[in-house]
Amino acid sequence: MNAIILSAVLGMVMMLCSFLVKNKSSLKHIASVGLLILLVANITDTYGKALFTFNTYDMFHYGRFGFLFNSIAIGSTLIYVLISGKEIERSGRYVAEYFTLIFFVLCGIALLSFYNNLLTLFLGMEIMTIPLYILTGSDKRNIKSNEAALKYFLMGSFSTGLMLMGIALTYGGTGTFNLEATRNAQVIYKGVASFLEILGLLFLLVSLAFKVSAAPFHFWTPDVYDGAPTVYTSFMATIVKAAGFIAFIRLCAVRMAETNTAIDWKLIFAIIIVSTLLVGNITAVFQQSVKRMLAYSSIAQAGFMLFALMSLNDVASEGIILYAAAYSLATIGIFAVLAKMKDYTFEGYNGLAKTQPVLAATNTIFLLSLAGIPLTAGFFAKYYMLAAVVKTGSYIWLVITGVLFAAISVYYYFRVIQAMYFKDGNSATEEITPSFKTGIILLAGIIILLGIFPSLILNWLYF
Amino acid sequence: MPIQYYIALAACLFCIGVVGVVTRRNAIIIFMCIELMLNAVNLLLVAFSKMHYNSALAVNTNTNAGIEAQVFVFFIMVVAAAEVSVGLAIIVMMYRNVHSVDINFLNRLKN
Amino acid sequence: MIALLLILIPLASGLLCFFISSERDAKSWSLFASILTLATAFAGTYSFLGIPSLSFDATWLPSLGSRFSIGLDGMGKMLCLLNSIAFPIVFASVYKNSYKKPGNFYGLMLLMQTGLMGVFLATDCLLFYFFWELALVPAYFLCSSWGGEKRIQVTFKFFIYTFTGSLLMLVGILFLYFKTTDHSFALQSFYHVKLSAPEENFLFWLFFIAFAIKMPVFPFHTWQPDTYEQAPTAVTMILSGVMVKMGLFGVIRWLLPMFPHAAMHYSHLIIILCVTGILYASLIAIRQDDLKRLIAYSSIAHIGLMCAAIFSSQRVGMHGVMIQMFNHGVNVIGLWIVADVIETQLGTRKFSELGGLARRAPALAMLLTVMALANVALPLTNAFIGEFLMFNGLFRYNVWIAAIGGISIILAAVYTLNMIQRVFYGNNSLLTDNANDVTTGTKIMLAVLVIVVVVLGVYPQPMLQLTSDTVQATFIKFHP
Amino acid sequence: MINLIFLVPFFPLLGFLINGLFRRSLSKNTISIIGSGVVLLSFIISIILFFDVKNNGGIVVHYFDFIDTESFQIPFAFQVDQLSVIFLLIITGVGFLIHLYSTSYMHAEPTEHFGRYFSYLNLFVFSMLLLVLGANYVVMFIGWEGVGLCSYLLIGFWFKNDSYNYAATKAFVMNRIGDLGFLLAIFWILNKLGTATYTEVFEQASALSPPDVTAITLLLFVGAVGKSAQIPLYTWLPDAMAGPTPVSALIHAATMVTAGIYMIARSNALYSLSHLSRDVVAIVGLTTAILAATIALYQNDFKKVLAYSTVSQLGFMFLALGVGAYTTGVFHVMTHAFFKALLFLAAGSVIHAMNGEQDITKMGGLRKKLPVTYFTFLIGVLAISGFPFTSGFISKDEILIATYTHSRVLFWFASFAAVLTAIYMFRLLMLVFYGGFRGTPEQEHHLHESPLAMTVPLIVLAILSAVGGFVQLPEAFGGHHYLNDFLSPVVPASVPEGAHVAVKEYYLLAGTAVGLIIIALLANKLFAVKKFAGVYTGFKKILADKWYIDELYNSIIVKPLNSIAGFLNTVIDKSIIDGIVNGTGRFVNYSARQLRLLQSGQVGNYILFMVLSITVLFLVFWNQEIILAFLQKIF
Amino acid sequence: MSITEILFWFLSVLALFSAIMVLISKNPVHSVLWLIIVFFTISGHYLLLNAQFLAIVNIIVYAGAIMVLFLFVIMLMNLNVETERQRNIWMKFFGVISGGLLLWIFISASRSATDISEKNILMGQGNIGLIQDLGKVLFREYALPFEISSVLFLSAMVGAVVIGKKE
């Protein structure tokens, strides 16, 4: 509860700052402090020290899982603001408003990590998405940014429609919006669940698949990520996407698992996973722009995260947390470096190791993490995902497919490394401040640390 | 009145909305079609609300069952209104830059 | 403790090396560190400090059931020894070469050594996989940064190829992990997994492909000649001298004891593949015009033989494999040193541009001849013992396969002598007219290798005894 | 005595190391002294050993465990017995003479190469000693390959010449083919008996099944065929003449090529058990003897004639072994070592005098210019042709007798080969030493008798060739088969006994004498000419071109192999296997280009896709049992 | 046929017809007007279902506010002429097909959903749609979501300002 209310309040504080604080660069610091407060509040909440206590009428479910993810999301946002704060300042005139929107997004994320009712799911999703439409379009003069915003908006609204249809149908089947539906209706379809509910869940699945950009509902992703200002792409591709997964896995774990006894969602997930991996990995191979490549790569990574949704066991829930952290941190890092580049194509990275060795080295660590090379957090993330499916004992072919696509993913991640280290060129960057370097080195350090001791994060689930 | 009638009606409206989204090129019309879809959902929710109410009535005459669906509809309307304000702002911004709301012209981002 | 030191010394010195900018310092530092490792390995091999010091166990990932547990058995000792001998020799032999960004170069080399050590030491499967990859990543950077002109694509292919293999292995590891009774990655738990026949067959291939790519076994070998050709020679030495042993090591340490039935079931197929590969690579080697490619194909043939001998499931053959792993490492490093000398001095590796070098560089010619003879497994060189035992194992498996595989010793003679002839004999070319003999340093280096070759060729018994415990242990689980 | 055994190979090894490592710093004289001295020392020790063995019998000395596994132990052990000591004497004795000869013959080489030469030669002696001293097949194999290596190094001694290098490689590779057979035989023995030590193997030989024995003996024979240049692996030996002439004398005539005979004689216990193998040995030997002799008839290269004669004589030896007369084979090895070394050294002397010219069509009438050489060569020719009571007569005569008792048919063929031997040797003699000189005037001017270091070995060998046969003089001529008696503990004697044998001896004696006179006359008439064209036509050309065997091998083995290798290299490896790997990459790239077209940038399309996907998912969901069942059927 | 049923059929047919007209009108302004009619018919349905509060809100919010906003924007952009060029005929075809498929899914799903096949809707009765009941629920159980939805409005407001403000 702390996180939900505080983030909304902090958002309003930032709004006030827009006319109270004249110095733009101090906004970043205010936001950082706010995020820190939020993080601390969320952690204290984790251990039962809530600032506010309401009767939520079962609208929310406060579980360790949700708290941990929320902490990760807030922490990642903190790191994101620390590293990319300067880029946010430069992205437009309404800096305070951007921070406001980021806080509102966090509010939505908090809702998504605690929701226990389809209404809160819906609200959380909308609160999270609507600010993103705006952030996407924040570069108002840039036609690409406009286009991305409009595409995102149209398709996002469409998926909202699908989600609502899903909610309505499940309601028709169960008579409740509560996630843990206590069914009084007689079970009909194949001995277990209502037919309408199944159809509704299918619609919900599709709309959430849309949010986490799983193929074939991924189409918005490359265009939007490409068109949005890089600094917001970074935010959208990481924290927001991870939040989508958290919402998704809760839905799967509670609603779909209930219907799971006779109806197997695994095949549907398998199809979605394969097509996501296919589209993400294969299309990324041919991209010329690193930014667009990263968009496809985020689709590919989503494919891996979907493994958790399919298997739904303890390994999966640990894994999705770890994956969310590893993926978010690495991608934030990559985008932070990308935002400093003058040329977003692969050629733009040529010879970065010579001009900016620190950037190149840390960027390499991020890319290795995304590729899932051991000693980086990404390895254990992938490891958990594969383990989750293997543990279910079936769909080994899916694991092998995933592994093969992981090998393909090396292809495009390493193209960046190749450009940075092995090709000649003078890649131009914006000015790199020492604090940026420090931040990015710290980020790389965290990734390596998690790559050796993933339990640093996962222990929070239990202790 | 059997619930199937309303399901069918809502489904028809919803699908007309979908067809509109797919076939039209004007961003505003597409947006309107999305609104149409939302309305279909609203109608369906209200119908379900009354259906569940009706079933619950047989057990308990004082029941409140189904009311949450109507509350939900209310929330949907709220969200739709918020969405419209943002959406139209984006469309207007777009129009300012390219002087068109034809989404076929939105193809700088592809492949 | 020694086991831990074997990993820590190269790791720490390697990380430190990244911060050394002076070329001299980097060279001396890495040489010093590798010699230190060598001393440690010697201490470990001959157990001056008692058996318990050879293993180390610490909590790592309790929730996953994986521990940081390392230990040395006979084969591990031998391969660690090989690994720690190889690096000082390599460092010393490239001492005169200069690399741009020397700190990075030597740092990566030492990290690669760390990875290799870890692979040979790990007794926990997840840890094994970790080190398996850790050895690969520095190799990628080394080859891509300091290699030949086509280095980027070639190394990339190498990386993706081997990475794919190891990912498949990861799937296998996971599958087995969930089958263990105590949910642990420990070697012993993996050995005791009960599997149904289809499961075992399936997992066997997941692991085997990873190892086969690493070795490499025909038809997974195509990355190898290109990589060896393009990689900087120092790296090639390690790749062919030590890294390919990872695959063989994996088969012996992990594959056979875990899937004994599947290994028996598929042994025929694999041996046929290997023997085909031996002849195939030997024939191709005959046609090579490039010194490095020739050595690469010859290496494929030798490794194929080792793999075949492993799957022949004969103790004799396994003894041969053990000793040959070490010997092949030594021999091939020697060959690469010569190749490097020739290339750095004359700027070419093409036979068509060489010739008559023996008159300008008699010492080099002599030393190369010894190494080359070891390559054709002439008696009283170390390789003879290995090949003798391995062919014996194959013979016990099947007479015809031994006979067909044996053709390779003829073909080996053809291409090796052809190489000697075209590099050292005949008339001088324009290039070789002004060549000089090797420097004293290289001469000493090669002489050391030659002495190792001859000593092990005449008196192989210590090496055989060193590894015999591994052979016994392997055959406890894996008995035909 | 035991303590001395290791010294026999040790001295040459020492010589090899000293000469090899310090060849630049030592003077030629020192090198010569060391190189020959070590062999002399070995010879002296061999003599001591000989007498020791004669008095006390054989002995096995175990040094250390070479290979020790649970399946078998292979000790590094030496066995000195009657058989090996004979070979020791031949190797070190003849070896010493040839070393001595070389000091003069190779004197023109630069010091460095002079040292290299002697170190190789010493290494060869070492390997050869290892071969005959080994107490098991593995040690024999070590020496076996070692001599092959030295042969390779020495054939290619003048490495500037590519054809010499080619000959060296050819020799090594062909030897290796035989070695493979040998190796497989060793495996077979090890596999069946668990040991490779002679004494144990021969004790247990009777326990082997007949197919095993046959296989082992045939595989061993394959080894022998390679090393001893029999059909079909003989073609390397004539080419091996590229090496310096003393090398040809030592390696390719006197010692190394007889290793095969040593091996089979050593394994007589096995061969006695397999009739088939012995027949194969005999027939291969005889065929080789005849084939090589026919080729030798029309060769114009001095050393090639001798080389084919060597092949032919080796064939005789195998014939002897094949008919079960093992001691006879060994005996012929010994006599052959004497007279063939002599012939080669004499040839070397001639070539030396002719300043490197080897073409006999360019020679003629040299007997006046090179009297010592002529005289010794004549003795050699007589010995090889079987002039009565020379060493060659006695040994060959014994082979023929043994063959006769074994099979009449073989006997007549063998006799034919013997006649051919006489013909080509006399042809050689006539062309080189009789008639008029056919070379250039400069060559004629240069002609001179060789120095003492070369003539002394010639003389010693000539004496041995003349009288060396008396150790095995048949009873018919008052002899006693001393060699047979000496070897009998190791090699069972197989001399046919009885009076009728003696009668045949006289027939043979008469026949040989008459034949030789006729041949000498014919040769004089045919070849002692002033001018000789050296161009042959018709059948002669076929013989002169060696039955086109080399060309045959070239076109059915070497060329196809080369083109297969090329095909594998360019087509299979690069295009198919690597093509599949790269093709996977290219396929990914191609699909990337196609798949990205899906991302059309049109919102309408995107949503259309989404809606269709929903439909598909719905259908899949509702029919998943069917789909899963289908999938299960596939996998 | 009762009056309710007659009304139901009338409103349904009108709603569908108007919806289709929204779709096929060339002029955006006409589309907006047809959509308003759809909203009215849906409000009529709400009334039939005795959801009076929603019926009113629907008219106020949708027809009154949202559609006016649309109209306003269209007017602002001067889109009242038939500027939209025709979409690809294939696109139309596939659009209709996909819509049809979706509809088919709905129909077949609801036909198979036997759990609701017996169920009826209580028309024109029941007080759950009345404002006092709704209000009680809204401000007790749903108070928190209600408050949180203000965040949505805030962000929409901020967004509209950020996006819409001319620079």
Image (cartoon, helix red, strand yellow):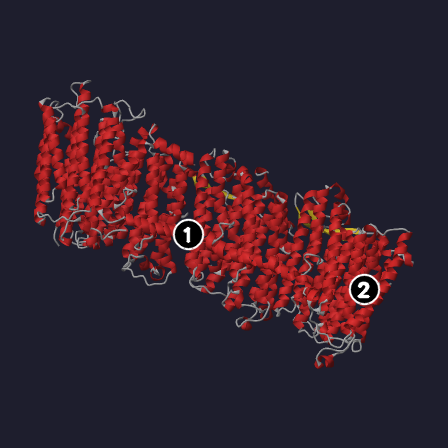
Residue D523, percent from left and from top: 79, 70
Task: State the quadrant of the C terminus of chain D.
Answer: top left
Residue at 22% from the left image edge and 26% from the top image edge: A175
Task: State the quadrant of the N terminus of chain D.
Answer: bottom right
Q: Is residue D276 above or below residue C181?
A: below
| Letter of the chain that mark 2 sits on in the rendering | D
How many numbered marks does the figure carry? Answer: 2
Name the residue carrying label 2: D385
Q: Amino acid at mark 2?
A: Ser
Q: Nearer the viewer, residue A342 or A436?
A: A342
Residue C16, percent from left and from top: 44, 56
Q: Nearer the viewer, residue A297 or D628?
A: D628
Residue D507: image quadrant is: bottom right
- Secondary structure beneath dot 2 equals helix
Callout 2 and callout 1 share a chain: yes
Q: Residues within 10 Å of mark 1 (few under 14, many from 20)?
A: some
In the rendered image, is residue D537 in sight?
A: yes
Residue at 38% from the left image edge and 50% from the top image edge: D587
Q: Earlier in the sequence, mark 2 or mark 1?
A: 2
Q: Amino acid at mark 1?
A: Gly
| Letter of the chain that mark 1 sits on in the rendering | D
Q: Nearer the viewer, residue A308 or E20?
A: E20
Q: Residues within 10 Å of mark 2 (few under 14, many from 20)?
A: many
Q: Is residue E87 above or below residue E8?
A: below
Residue D520: image quadrant is: bottom right
Position of D202 with respect to E113 (left or right) is right
Position of A72 with respect to D512 (left or right) is left
Position of C214 with respect to A2 (left or right) is right
- Secondary structure beneath dot 1 equals helix
Q: Nearer the viewer, residue A132 or A263?
A: A263
Name the residue carrying label 1: D583
